[in-house]
Amino acid sequence: MKSLLARGSELASPKEQLRILSEVSSRKGLPLFEEKLQEIGSFPLRPTGIDILQVNVGKLCNQSCKHCHVDAAPDRKEVMSKETMQECLVALASPNITTLDITGGAPEMNPNFKWFVEEASKLGKKILVRCNLTIVLAGEKYRGLPEFFAKHRVEVISSLPYFQKRRTDAQRGEGVFDRSVQALQKLNEIGYGIPGSGLILNLVYNPGGAFLPGGQSTLESDFKRELKQHFGVEFNSLFALTNMPISRFLEFLLESGNLDSYLEKLVTTFNPSAAAGVMCRNTLSVGWDGSLYDCDFNQMLDMQLEGEVTKISDFNQASLDARAIRLEQHCYGCTAGAGSSCGGSLA
């Protein structure tokens, strides 16, 4: 099967990525994801409500990580406008939504990022920011981010592939580990990750290859021990996420010859308990242009919501709660093994 790289470093279209997963599944005799849900009486999959509004404020980023399902990079032009952010705030005012989860790219690079956080804070909502850590050291413009986060009691969630330099740099780029540690130390200095401070700092682990993450509790213990011992770094929790077979990771699987075996592994380790708690059931994903999706992964595959409400400007809680969630073969990534969501393992 030919590489996804069609023109330079440009990935294949979302439609082509879905076709590739479907082709492999058919050739290997793997069941459709919806068939698995039918077996356990969970199809069609429907929301339990909207607790979390996850907003992707743009694909602009100061890094180009190999595992990035967003395909974010320094040259991306997709950035959410202030007008669309305002529409997100109108939806966020719903009493049923408790949490704003801001992601990117590097969300801090959106020129209206701080305004967005300030306005969401006024609504009394819990605010999560998925920070790649190195942005904290990316120049004077971003140097005050730790203090800004603390002022608004933002929960910081940051990716750190491993507690060693070699594995982290291999996945995220040369020098990223050292800069990430420096950023963690800065966050610790103002209380983030320190017991009793109330300032939450969580880390995210993604496997560096074509395998599922190990046990989340064991990984967390290892990360806490190694980071504290060697760098004096503390954090609250570790989230272990399965790499989704889309975008740059799909490219890696194809080039390394691991796509067939990886997809088969996801299917054969399907966990019904994890399927019951997948993030698409309580989270609404908003794209940089205001389009709505069942989850962040569907967003990257251009699988927009089905139904009348497809833009955040038309937000309607009752209509959204009644929808059927769109499913494809990549959904196995959230239900394999212990399960995987933006908050880590599910079972």
Image (cartoon, rainbow, N blue to C red):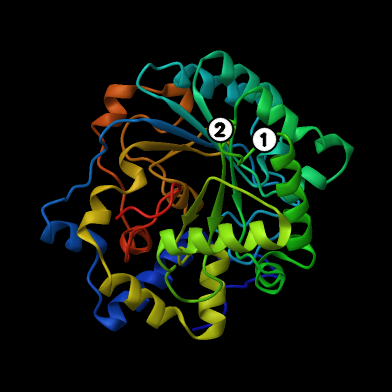
**At numbered mark 2, what does the secondary structure look like: helix, strand or loop?**
loop
276 vs 39: above or below: above
Residue positioned 56% across, 20% down in the render: 120
Above-or-below relation of 78 to 10: above
Q: Secondary structure at mark 1?
A: loop
Disc 1 or 2, which lies upstream in sequence?
Answer: 1
Q: Is residue 301 visible?
A: yes
Q: Looking at the picture, how far across and down is residue 181, in whole percent? A: 73, 55
Instruction: Name the residue rendered at 24%, 80% in the picture.
Output: 29
| Residue labelled with disc 1 | 191
Q: In 3D space, how far apart are the residues under numbered discs 1 and 2 (Cα atoms)?
A: 9 Å
Dot 1 alpha-carbon crowd within 10 angstroms: few under 14, some 14 to 19, many 20 or more: many
* Residue 58: % across, % down: 64, 41
- Horizontal placement of 169 versus 98: left or right? right
* Front-most of residues 208 and 92: 208
Residue 216 horizontal side relative to residue 327, left or right: right
* Label pair 1/2, CB-CB below 8 angstroms: no
The residue that disc 2 covers is: 196
Q: Nearer the viewer, residue 47 or 194?
A: 194
